[in-house]
Amino acid sequence: MARHKIKENSATPFTTLLLISLALLFLPQSITKNLNFFFIELFKPFLSIGIDRPKKIFLSSDTSGDIVSRAEYDRLWRAYKNIESELLLLEDKYETLAKYRLSMPLPGPALMPAGVVTTQPSQEIIIDRGSNDGIKKGFYVLGADSIIGEVIETSPSTSRIALLTKKNQMIQVRILRDGKRKYFSANMIGTGLGYCKIDLLPTHEDIQKGDSVYAAPKPGILGGAYIIGEVAKIWPSNENPLLWDITVKPSVSAKDLKDVAVIIMDPKEVSGALD
C-alpha cells in the first residue's frame, strides 16, 4: 500500500510539468517571449557568475599632443611614403653607378646612369637622359659592363642610342686573344640581325673563334679599349678567300637591359655623373 502511494506521489510532479510544457508549447509567441525575458531577469545574477566583464580603459585627459585628425595622418603618411620612394630611387642609382664604376679600367671618365624607355631589338633603344643632362651625340653607352652602342640623337630629356647590331652601324674595334699582347684593328658593322660583321682582315692574321672584341679608344669619347663581344664564327670570305669573314656576337643582349650608363669623358661639364 505504501509502495503504491509513493508511485502516485512521484508521478504527480511529472504529470504537472508535462501539462505545463504542453501549455507553453501552444501559447502564442507574444506571451512566451515575455515569459523568456522574465526568466532571464530573474536568474541574471546566477547566470553572470564566472563571466569576466571588460575593464574600463582610462585615458589621460590631455592627449592633444598625441592625436591628429585622420586627414592629417593620411597627409603625413603620403609624405613619408614619398620620401621613402625617393630614398629607394637614390639607392638604386648609387648601386647602378657603383657597379659600372668598378668595371671602368681607367680613371677619368664619369658615368651617367639612365633607364631604358623603349627597345627596338638589334636596332635602337631610347633612354631617359638627354641634352639637359649633358648627354651628347657620339657618347658611348655601357650595358652590363659592355659597350652596347652610341648616342645618335638627343632631346632635352631623352636620347636615342644606336645599338652596335643596328644595320650599317659602324665602330672601330680591336681583336685580342686572351694571354696575347698583339691586337688587330678593324672596322665592325652591324647587320640588324643581332650580331655584327668584320671583314677586310687578311687570312694570314692569327684570328680564332673566341677571341675578344673591344671598342677601340676614341678621343673625347672613350679613353681605353672596352669589351664588346667575341668572335663567334670565322672563315675565308666567299668573295675574296684571302680575307676573313668574321661574325661577332655581342656580350650583352640589349633587350634584357633595364638600365644603362653613358660614358662621360669630361665629367666637369656634366652634373649627376659619377667620377
Image (cartoon, helix red, strand yellow):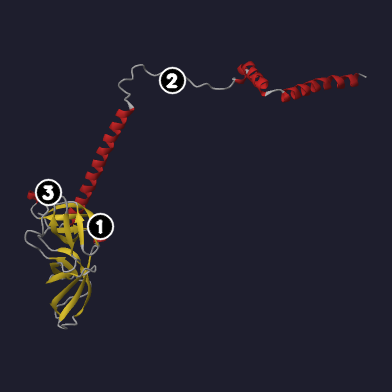
Name the residue located 26 percent from the left edge and 35 percent from the top edge: 79
Quadrant position of residue 59: top left
Label of residue 132 in the image: 3
Residue 178 can be seen, yes or no: no
Q: Position of residue 70 (x, y in %)?
A: 33, 28
Q: CA distance from mark 2 to mark 3?
A: 61 Å
Sequence order check, earlier mark of 2 and 3: 2
Camera-side residue: 252 or 103? 252
Label of residue 257 in the image: 1
Q: Nearer the viewer, mark 3 or mark 1?
A: 3
**Which residue is labeled 2 in the image?**
57
Label of residue 48 in the image: none
Q: Secondary structure at mark 3?
A: helix
With 146 as the anchor, is 29 left or right in this view? right
Q: Position of residue 163 (x, y in %)?
A: 19, 63
Q: Position of residue 232 (x, y in %)?
A: 23, 72
Q: Nearer the viewer, mark 2 or mark 3?
A: 3
Sequence order check, earlier mark of 1 and 2: 2
